[in-house]
Every structure is written in C-alpha cells, then in structure tokens.
C-alpha cells in the first residue's frame, strides 16, 4: 500500500451559503474525509494551486460567485487537475440540469443537500475513479 492510499481523501466543498457549506463540510469530515471549504471560485483555485494535499473531488454549487462561475470552474479544474472528480449542484432545476450535462461523472446533485446522500455519492464517485486508475 502506498503512502497516498493511507491518507484521507481530500474534498473541496464550495458554496457561498456559509451555513450549508459548514454543515456539509462537517458531516463529510465526520465521514473521514479531509475537507477544504470555499465560498467562491477564487478560493477553489487557490486550494488547488496551494493545496497541501491532492484534491480528490470538488463539490461546487452551480451559482458559485466570483471570477469563474461553476461551469467555467469545472473546465478550469478539468484542464489543470484532470484526476479530480467534480460534482456540480444547483438549487434551480435548469442550473442543476446544465450541471449534469457538463459532468462526465453522472448525475448532478440538487440543493438543498441531504448530507447522507452527498456522502454516499462522493464515496461511489471516488471508488469508481480508483477502479479506473488501477
């Protein structure tokens, strides 16, 4: 077993709503993930670029503010960190459907989040990614 496999998987939860972001991030930490939080796309980029750990997955609200919207951010991550899994979520049906079309990883997530469902979805996504890489 290599050193990376023993480390907890690392996620970024990006949502401008501090209450939603904090609650979901805390739940995911309790599930054993290392979680960075971001309120805007600029903070996500910084987390990837300065990351003390490799980022395994990004969960971003489709209405994320600042320099890049969530769809542009997805393209940036895909271009710079292709191994990171990406989940986009939307509270508006149209935004959520658009997020689903942009993600190769499958279905989008809808807000409000059900923390258990999000954790289960992330676990399946990361397990599938590990199988593809081996």
Image (cartoon, rainbow, N blue to C red):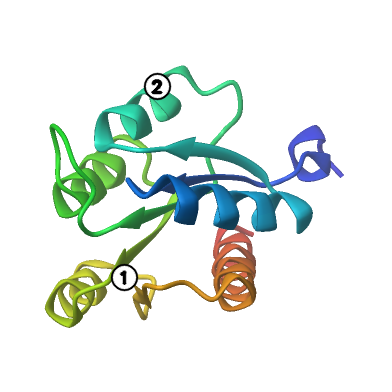
Q: Residue at x 17, y 54 (%)?
A: 71
| Cα–Cα gap, marks 1 and 2 | 23 Å
Give whichever of discs 1 and 2 has the lower sequence position.
2
- Residue 63 x %, y %: 20, 55
Q: Is 78 displayed left or right of 11 in the figure? A: left
| Tag 1 near tag 2, CB within 8 Å | no
In which image quadrant can residue 45 be found?
A: top left
Dot in front, 1 or 2: 2
In which image quadrant can residue 133 be found?
A: bottom right
Say above or below: 82 vs 113.
Answer: above
Rate crowding at label 2 as few (under 14), some (14 to 19) or many (20 or more) other CA atoms within 10 Å. Answer: few
- Residue 9 x %, y %: 67, 47
Q: Is 70 displayed left or right of 14 in the figure? A: left
Circle on res. 49 = 2
Residue 39: tell me if it is visible.
yes
Say above or below: 39 vs 122.
Answer: above
Determine the secondary structure under disc 2.
helix
Determine the secondary structure under disc 1.
loop
Rate crowding at label 1 as few (under 14), some (14 to 19) or many (20 or more) other CA atoms within 10 Å. Answer: few
Circle on res. 123 = none
Say above or below: 107 vs 87.
Answer: below
Say above or below: 65 vs 88.
Answer: above
Q: Quadrant of the N terminus?
A: top right
Q: Is 78 displayed left or right of 52 in the figure? A: left
Q: Is 97 displayed left or right of 81 in the figure? A: left
Q: Residue at x 33, y 67 (%)?
A: 89
| Residue nearest the observer in this picture, 121 or 56 | 121
Circle on res. 104 = 1
Residue 83: tell me if it is visible.
no
Q: Residue at x 30, y 34 (%)?
A: 80
> Which residue in the rendered view is the most extreme toward the front?
19
Q: Residue at x 19, y 75 (%)?
A: 92
């Amino acid at each position: 077993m290599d050193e990376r496999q023993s480390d907890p998987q690392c996620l970024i939860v990006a949502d401008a709503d501090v209450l939603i972001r904090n609650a979901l991030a805390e739940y995911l930490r309790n599930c054993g993930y290392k979680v960075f939080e971001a309120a805007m796309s600029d903070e996500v980029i910084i987390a990837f670029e300065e990351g003390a750990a490799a980022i395994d997955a990004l969960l971003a609200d489709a209405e994320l503010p600042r320099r890049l919207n969530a769809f542009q951010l997805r393209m940036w991550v895909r271009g710079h960190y292709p191994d990171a899994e990406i989940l986009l979520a939307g509270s508006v049906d149209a935004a959520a459907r658009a997020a689903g079309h942009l993600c190769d990883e499958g279905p989008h997530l809808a807000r409000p989040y059900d923390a258990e469902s999000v954790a289960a979805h992330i676990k399946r996504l990361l397990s599938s990614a590990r199988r593809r890489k081996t």
